[in-house]
């Protein structure tokens, strides 16, 4: 048998309309991906370093380092806006802040970090916390969280990651999340300076671009 | 290898609509033709097509390794010198590839001969991976084909598997897919790959190649300014290398499918380079660069532009006289010459085998027929079975 006899996926039925998908709109994807199946891990959510320390006095250094890392990550990945009004429309009054200079090429306003989420596993180790080791880790199992104070926003009263993943209520302390939530790399927010630098050859000759 | 008439499925056009197969008839001519099919024996498939396909692919990779290390060859392959480093890097970093299609002349008896390697932007993927398999299933269910019939076709499974591998081992969680938006065939091919990617757990948005933006960094972005981390492009490298953003290709961090080193394989200069490296290999035809053409040669030759698609600008020459040729926009980058090897003729049609690879594994075949000796974009796609 040259080919496994799998049944054709239902997915392919939807090919009936060859459509042009809408472009992704930064944070506004909003796909809830809390628990996957089986491959979950516990995570803890805090508003600030002090909030984290109050609950975990022995992990003072971890709380501080995690907060600072999350703050930096929030500047890198948060949705950016060119006007304060646009930002506040999505994230609510008094909830937007200036984008730190290294990330300002895309926009000057972004939602303030509402907290951070850290894998619970970090708190299980009572030995001396090695801050250099923490900083050198490529995957820290840590992410900044955002929320909206605009009651019409789907993120009102929720904690969401920069990809738009909904991680529960703003007041929640604990979450079970799929491991992939931490694994996903969140790109730096950007804005195109130009478009149309590819595609001209076909546009001009209208010869087939394909190879068959 | 037999060509056998068969009744069409009565409602195949409705089924095609349901699957979004919109280009089964183009310019009023049938493209998908199920009034007959080809039958191969398992021995023909395994010994004459599957094994040689993987072997030819390995030989091609050896040529890539040679070309990226030689300025004179990079020049012969018409790679712009500003991109030599980027092409070589993409090879040295072993950037993963997705798929290719080798075009073979095969008559069921003598060794299959490589006509060219469509390693960068092969199409007819949906027809091969899904549609001809559906034909087989439905014709077997209808009793028009024996239950013992099989097909050399693991293309869809292998594509999904390969895309899943790219997600798991190369972090391809989101992959943009782009093509020229106004070509229904290209868009259909890319949509099929998007569906395969989603099946593999990859988020797979579409972006028109002309809508790709360039942001500071530099990085390439989609219409929503999201960076292109992974990008499948059904658009040839030789075009991109000569367009406005070519310079940024070396530095922008996008992982492209196919990777840049494929520009060496989807290039007709591959053919003389292969012949030089593996002279007299049973699956290769003699081929020469223009300035290396043997003076005394009187045999029939095929002249192919370094860059050409869909048979465009290809001429069949005999004693230096053009016997048959196809018009087109290509040829400004020069030509290569390949010994003429007649395609087998079944009835009044010339038959060409497309042999697919996913990464380096043979994954199935497609059969095309044309009334002309030069297979073009309006050639018909004919399904096949394995029996015996």
Image (cartoon, rainbow, N blue to C red):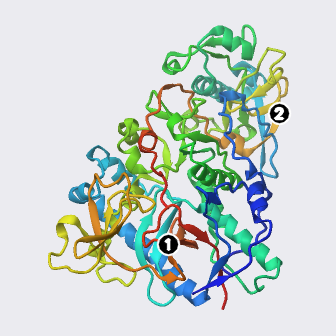
* Position of B223 relative to B73 (above/below): above
- What's the chain of the residue with tag 1? B
Secondary-structure class at tag 2: strand
Q: Residue at x 38, y 50 (%)?
A: B238
Classed neighbour count for the residue bearing mark 2: other residues with Cα under 10 Å, few (<14), some (14–19), many (≥20) = some
Classed neighbour count for the residue bearing mark 1: other residues with Cα under 10 Å, few (<14), some (14–19), many (≥20) = some
Secondary-structure class at tag 1: loop
- What's the chain of the residue with tag 2? A
Looking at the picture, how far across and down is residue B346, in whole percent? Answer: 53, 83
Looking at the picture, how far across and down is residue B89, in whole percent? Answer: 36, 51
Task: Let me know if residue A139 appears in the view.
Answer: no
Q: CA distance from mark 1 to mark 2?
A: 69 Å
- Give the quadrant of the N terminus of chain B: bottom right
Query: Looking at the image, is mark 1 or mark 2 nearer the viewer?
Result: 1
**Picture quarter containing residue B146?**
bottom right
Looking at the picture, how far across and down is residue A14, in whole percent? Answer: 77, 51
- Give the quadrant of the C terminus of chain B: bottom right
Residue under label 2, please give it.
A174
Q: Are marks 1 and 2 on the same chain?
A: no
Q: Residue at x 74, y 34 (%)?
A: A165
> Is residue B242 or residue A97 the one in the foreground?
B242
Task: Let me know if residue B288 appears in the view.
Answer: yes
Which labelled disc corresponds to residue B371?
1
């Amino acid at each position: 048998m040259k080919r496994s006899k799998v049944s054709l996926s239902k997915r392919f039925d939807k090919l009936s309309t060859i459509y042009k998908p809408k472009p992704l709109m930064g944070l506004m994807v909003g796909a809830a991906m809390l628990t996957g199946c089986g491959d979950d891990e516990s995570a803890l959510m805090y508003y600030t370093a002090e909030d984290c320390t109050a609950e975990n006095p022995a992990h003072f250094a971890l709380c501080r380092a995690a907060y600072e890392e999350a703050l930096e990550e929030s500047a890198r990945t948060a949705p950016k806006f060119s006007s304060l009004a646009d930002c506040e429309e999505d994230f609510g009054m008094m909830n937007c802040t200036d984008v730190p200079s290294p990330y300002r090429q895309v926009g000057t306003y972004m939602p303030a970090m509402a907290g951070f989420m850290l894998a619970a596993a970090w708190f299980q180790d009572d030995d001396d916390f090695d801050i250099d080791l923490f900083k050198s880790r490529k995957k820290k199992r840590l992410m900044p969280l955002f929320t909206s104070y605009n009651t019409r926003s789907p993120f009102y009263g929720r904690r969401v990651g920069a990809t738009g993943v909904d991680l529960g209520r703003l007041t929640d302390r604990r979450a079970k999340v799929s491991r992939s939530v931490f694994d996903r790399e969140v790109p730096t927010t950007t804005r195109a300076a130009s478009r149309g630098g590819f595609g001209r050859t076909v546009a001009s000759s209208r010869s087939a671009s394909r190879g068959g | 290898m037999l060509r056998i008439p068969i009744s069409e499925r009565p409602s195949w056009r409705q089924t095609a609509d349901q699957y979004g197969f919109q280009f089964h008839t183009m310019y009023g001519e049938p493209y998908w033709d199920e009034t007959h099919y080809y039958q191969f024996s398992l021995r023909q498939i395994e010994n004459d097509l599957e094994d040689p396909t993987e072997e030819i692919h390995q030989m091609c990779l050896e040529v890539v390794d040679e070309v990226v290390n030689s300025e004179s060859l990079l020049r012969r392959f018409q790679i712009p010198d500003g991109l030599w480093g980027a092409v070589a890097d993409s090879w040295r970093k072993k950037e993963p590839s997705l798929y290719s299609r080798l075009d073979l002349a095969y008559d069921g008896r003598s060794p299959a001969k490589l006509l060219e390697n469509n390693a960068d932007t092969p199409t007819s993927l949906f027809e091969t991976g899904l549609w001809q398999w559906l034909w087989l299933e439905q014709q077997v269910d209808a009793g028009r084909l024996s239950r013992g019939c099989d097909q050399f076709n693991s293309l869809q499974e292998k594509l999904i598997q390969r895309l899943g591998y790219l997600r798991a081992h190369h972090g391809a969680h989101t992959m943009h897919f782009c093509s020229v938006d106004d070509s229904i065939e290209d868009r259909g091919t890319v949509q099929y790959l998007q569906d395969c990617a989603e099946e593999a757990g990859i988020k797979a948005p579409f972006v028109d190649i002309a809508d790709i933006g360039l942001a500071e960094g530099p990085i390439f972005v989609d219409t929503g300014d999201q960076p292109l981390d992974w990008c499948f492009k059904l658009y040839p490298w030789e075009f991109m290398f000569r367009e406005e953003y070519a310079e940024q290709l070396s530095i922008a961090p996008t992982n492209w499918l196919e990777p840049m080193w494929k520009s060496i394989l989807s290039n007709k200069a591959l053919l003389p380079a292969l012949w030089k490296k593996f002279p007299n290999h049973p699956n290769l035809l003699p081929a020469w660069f223009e300035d290396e053409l043997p003076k005394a040669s009187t045999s029939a030759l095929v002249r192919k532009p370094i860059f050409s698609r869909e048979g465009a600008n290809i001429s069949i020459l005999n004693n230096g006289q053009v016997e048959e040729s196809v018009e087109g926009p290509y040829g400004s980058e020069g030509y290569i010459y390949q010994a003429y090897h007649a395609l087998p003729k079944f009835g009044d049609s010339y038959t060409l085998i497309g042999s697919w690879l996913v990464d380096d594994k043979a994954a199935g075949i497609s059969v095309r027929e044309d009334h002309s000796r030069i297979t073009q974009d309006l050639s018909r796609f004919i399904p096949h079975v394995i029996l015996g």
